[in-house]
Image (cartoon, rainbow, N blue to C red):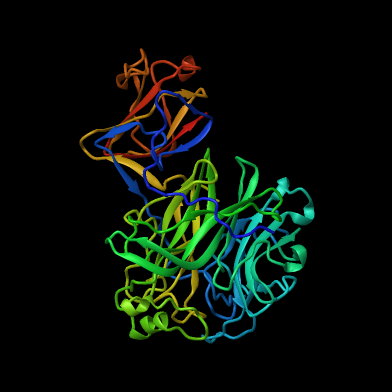
Amino acid sequence: MVSLTFVAHTAIGANPVAADAAKPVSLDKGVHLLLDNHLIASSAGVERKVISPQRFLAEPIVTGALEHQNWQPFFTVVHDPANPSGKPFRMWYNVDAVDDPADGNYFGVTGHLESPDGVRWPGPCDRLNSLTVDGRVRFGASVIDDGSRARTPAERFKMLYFDAGTFAGPRVAFSPDGRQWTLHNGGKPVLPGNNGDDIWTAGFDPLRQRYFLIGKIYAPFTWTNAEGKQITATIRRYFTCFSADFKTWSEPKMVYSPDEKDSGITQWYGSAGLLVRGKLMVSFLRVLRDDMSPEGVPAEAVEANTRGKAGLGASGFGAAGGSGMGYTTLTWTRDGETWQRDRHTDKFFEPDPRVGSWDHAMSWVGSSVEVGDDVFLYYAGYRWGHKYHHSVDRQLGVVKVKRDRFVARQAGAQPGIIKTPTVVVDGDALKLNVDSPNGEVRVQITNAAGEALPGFGFQDCRPIKTDSLGADVTWAKPLATLHGQAVRLEVSITNARVFAFEVH
């Protein structure tokens, strides 16, 4: 067991330094998102635009009703084509311990649901009684399906969750099928924790072949916010740990703390929904603003967040008029340890602005699943605030975004240019994830000095005028003739958006 002694505090920003132009970047086979500035040495006339996912359903997919019994926003959805039931979408989440649809019950266990298409979740939920109860409260169900890479079939599914009972802290469990679970070390916490340190998320890093977790610390912290005000408050911050076996974890390292770029009282409820794209790991950071309220909020929702009821741990920030709001921003890492995040001006997914809608106060992404050309993002929504009607209004929904289209580099009628640092292209073909049916995109390849190579100028590139997740880039000469050469790519964008390169 390790102690919670933090070994580093990493400053997180939205604009990491571009790659060193003196050392060519290896443009390996696979996808290269233009989410950060790693592949952008310079640009002119081009805007970075965060693309919000699309709401395509009017109602939530999992509710507090008897068939679902949901009462928390922390869950996991996976796609399991081999599921014997024939329903390949599976969800683990927090449910009421008893069949009681009334608001106010504060006692939860872990539930399991299945779906044929990821949209319809008919229920009834299955309470996983093999995860024995240790106390009154359970938070989270962060599940990893190791599939064929599992060292033993009995540990194919791995779960990280928090129980507050004899011991307060994060627990680990293993299962061969996702239904029958065995608690590791008798259910004792794998890291020390207190009752407030309750929301944890786990993931697997295939690039470094290790597991990691994002763990919560709920404690006093002092910082100066974007308004120049020094604040000391008990808030939620997050750290990361690593493991080779999901049982023994490294010393914690802080990654998410508020600073002078964060407005008001910014907190988090961890990040979740990990996607690995090339050498980039992308996740979704759940931002909490307990000092804010949605339009039309009832006074009792603010009151619930000021003093709280039934031991809900209200922050007291409601005294400034806040019922509590939450939204999602993008977060990512290139080394598996140092996480970058979009700042408060770059919200990825916001609550529904329509007054009274089920997700009018909160929109927290909790899980991601690739479905064809789309990524389904499963999220939690609250109607009026953080601590109001907690057993009935914490519901789950789904939105979607086209694959790899989280951030665009876009330009209008006046052409814009993106230039990469020097790169070595490890492939014979280049594709673009691009949206340009009403404009065009061209790519030019130059030497390190910026001089167009014969046969690879803008005039030699067939213009891309399409909406495609993988549009071919072709020149007068084949890309394979440049193997081993240090070059630059220049992308000309007119009335179009470019999201990613893909090397084949």
Instruction: Give the quadrant of residue 257.
Output: bottom left
Residue drawn where x is 48% and y is 52% of the image:
9
Where is residue 458 shown, x and y percent of the image? 31, 22
Q: In this view, does 351 lie above or below 383?
A: above
Count of labels in the image: 0
Task: Answer with left or right where residue 427 lies relative to residue 322.
Answer: right
Q: Is residue 215 visible?
A: yes
Question: In which quarter of the view is residue 421 placed?
Answer: top left
Q: Which of 174 and 265 is in front in this view?
A: 265
Q: Residue at (55%, 68%) from the top-left corner?
A: 197
Can see residue 112? no
**Residue 203 at what x, y percent from top left?**
60, 53
User: Which residue is at the far top?
Assistant: 454
Q: Nearer the viewer, residue 284 or 21?
A: 21
On the picture, is 20 further left or further right than 200?
left
Q: Residue at the spot x=55%, y=80% of the render?
A: 65
Tell me: residue 358, above or below residue 32: below
On the image, the x and y values in percent for residue 49 come to 32, 47
Relative to the observer, which residue lies in front, 433 or 366? 366
Task: Give the camera-side residue of 86 and 394.
Answer: 394
Quadrant including the N terminus: bottom right
In percent of width and height, residue 484 lies at 50, 17
Question: What residue is at 57 percent from the left and 65 percent from the top?
Answer: 75
